[in-house]
Amino acid sequence: MEKMKTGKTVPFNWVRAAAVMCIITCISDFVVLFVLGSCYQGYSQLRNTISSLGATISPVSKLISAWWILIGIVFVFFGVFFRKAFEKDGRYVKLASLLIVMYGLGEGIGSGLFKADSINGKRTFSFLLHDIVGGIGIIAAVLLPLVMCSVISKEDNSPFYCFSWIVFIIGSITLLCFGIRFPSEAGDLIASCKGLWQRLFLLNLYVYFIAISVIMYNRKIPV
């Protein structure tokens, strides 16, 4: 409970709390990735995937897996209160909320529970599950800006509407660079920088989550 200047108390605002937690998590995740990556000898932020930090052979495997589960919970929490914040803005709010929750469950909790392990160069069943749940989370993240264009229309907020399209385009390009092997020397160069494309995708997404969080925080919502 919070006290107003008049001495009266008001209920804690969970929507604003979720927005602040999302902002802190997005910033913290990048810091954690670079700090733990520096603790893994031979690990390259540009060439190696983020998933390899959580593999069993990684010296920071347990730490990063626990961290992923934690941020997954935060995004699920954020997705639930996102719906509360925008519940009066149409049917697409439920879909956007579901996509955020799917991202938290897939890329966060799922990636933390299932390690990207290989044995004798072959992917394990855990690796397969890691790819499946992570892939579901990534697809949800890519689609989120498109759905948000219906939640916050051009008439409601033109700059954010245009920003949503920019985020979708950048997200799609970085995802293609990360996941598709192009048959050329340039393609080999692109493929060798998987870590770079993955981090650019994440940066693009997190900036978008922060923008949504700021809008959430400033909305007038019954407490």
Image (cartoon, rainbow, N blue to C red):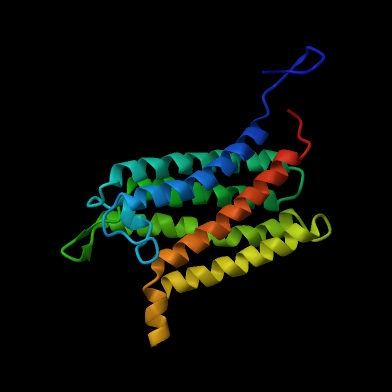
**In this rendering, position of residue 5 left or right of residue 33:** right
- In this orientation, which residue lies closer to the viewer: 221 or 61? 61
The answer to whether 204 is drawn above or below residue 15 in the figure is below
The residue positioned 41% from the left and 82% from the top of the image is 187
Percent position of residue 177, x then y: 46, 73
Q: Position of residue 185 (x, y in %)?
A: 38, 86
Q: Count the numbered circles shown.
A: 0
Residue 181 appears in which quarter of the rendering?
bottom left
59 relative to 202 in the view: left or right: left
Relative image position of residue 18 (x, y in whole percent): 61, 37
| Residue with the most extreme bottom position | 184
Can residue 105 be spotted in the picture? no
Residue lying farthest to the left in this orientation = 120
Q: Quadrant of residue 178?
A: bottom left
Q: Position of residue 25 (x, y in %)?
A: 52, 42
Asked whether residue 60 is in view, the answer is: yes
Q: Is residue 119 above or below residue 216?
A: below
Classify the position of the N terminus by image quarter: top right
Q: Is residue 35 left or right of residue 56?
A: right
